[in-house]
Amino acid sequence: VGVLLLGLDGFRLINDTLGHAAGDQLLREVGERLQQLVHGSNTLARPGGDEFSIFVQDADLVQMEELAGQVLEALRRPFHVAGQEVYVSCSIGICFYPEDGRDNESLLRNAHVALHQAKEEGRNTYRLYRRQLNEDAGYRLALRSDLRQALDRGEFVLYLQPKVETSSGLVTSAEALLRWVHPQRGMISPVVFIPLLEETGLIEPVGEWVLEESCAIIRRLQEQGFRDFTVAANLSPRQFHQQDLAQRIGQFIGRHGLRAEEPELELEITESMLMRHEAQSMDLLRQLHEMGIRLAIDDFGTGYSSLSYLTRFPVDYLKIDRSFITQIGHSQEGETVVRAVISMARDLGLKVIAEGVETRIQLEFLRIIGCDLIQGYLFSPPVPEEELARMLERQARGERIGAGKADT
Ligand code: C2E
Ligand code: CA
Ligand code: CA
């Protein structure tokens, strides 16, 4: 059993400034959001004060880490208490039964130890109880060594998540998302293994594989009759600084017979990647731009750059980060930000992609304000290549995919 103990950061301040009634209301709302993350036989409890605990049956480390990530994410949206928007973050401690304690008391005590460590290390984060930390190091070590062989053994696969054009309701492109099918552990999330690839430098060969495989997918789709379909691959910061990246990409494009002028391969980079090594980035982007490759700024809004600054780089798309999209229907300020980004982007000649669209309310809002492309679970999660091809076949027969335009 995995135990996740969460303490709200700065709760006392809220109590002191807004009053106890507001504090109580906040606790209830936090409880409600957490409840949505708790399924089946797992349990949510409030052991006291500003603390909540979640017990997860048959949990392994990866699951607990993912849950911790979801909890941090769930509390990122503002709360509405006492007529105000309130932001809270939380710190999380994690421990495991029976390794870290055989009874409730010792488990909670050890979870507290980890929680305090999380608070000390800057809050809005999670920590594992030390025993587990050691095992964690072991787990990562094991994964790391498995990763070395994963490429040769063909354990990587690209899933594709459709992007839907808001104006036509058609799927015209997809994002390639990396998956690792571990022979014993099953499918492992990129959130877990991409940092390991980066640490070990393996991201360079694996990243190249992603680029080449994306080109191969485009080619295979073309052979099935789906012309002009584009696939966007993610670039990691480390790859971004590979000397001959543009040249390599050019080779992949040629090898798989993509269009030379406006290749069907697109690239996604994050704004922080541009910020860090500005001159070098500019160089590479210019080269890619000259090759006709379209570029998207991923996770837009999470960095600290301004839109006007970004447009100094030759980019074509902005992908508004999911954390903004989730605010639609909940926060007026959030909606204002989305609206402003879209109208500014349009004035600057950039297309806008909304990522993480999960509800019809979000879709409607985005359609009305003229967002160009939509990506998210509402239409489809990332799917294997064959499934995407089946979707495109249905679309070619005139059937509608997901919640497209034909709907309204
Ligand atoms: P990202 O580039 O921001 O990719 C979007 C992530 O959001 C994907 O998670 C996708 O499955 C998820 N997502 C899509 N729609 C929704 C939705 O409606 N709701 C929610 N809650 N989530 C949604 P995934 O596939 O786990 O990838 C996570 C991150 O891993 C990616 O974030 C990207 O940063 C990285 N990554 C994935 N593949 C690659 C790759 O080939 N190379 C590099 N460098 N990074 C990759
Ligand atoms: Ca992306
Ligand atoms: Ca993103």
Image (tube, rainbow, N blue to C red):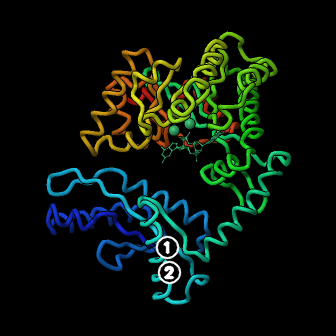
Viewer-proximal residue among 304 and 320: 304
Viewer-proximal residue among 117 and 225: 117
Q: Is residue 305 left or right of residue 174?
A: left
Residue under pointer 1: 114
Q: In which quarter of the image is the C terminus?
A: top left
Residue under pointer 2: 110
Q: In this view, does 92 lie above or below 155?
A: below
Residue drawn at (40%, 16%) of the image: 348
Viewer-proximal residue among 296 and 325: 296
Q: Does the residue labelled 2 lie within 8 Å of ligand 1?
A: no
Q: In this view, does 168 lie to the left or right of 334?
A: right
Q: Which amino acid does label 2 sit on?
A: Asn
Q: What residue type is labelled 1?
A: Ala
Q: In this view, does 357 lie above or below 290?
A: below
Residue drawn at (46%, 83%) of the image: 109
User: Disc number at residue 6?
Assistant: none
Q: Are marks 1 and 2 in contact (CB under 8 Å)?
A: yes
Q: Position of residue 146 (x, y in %)?
A: 79, 57
Residue drawn at (68%, 46%) of the image: 198
Label 1, residues with CA under 10 Å away: few <14, some 14-19, many ≥20: many
Q: Is residue 139 above or below residue 320?
A: below
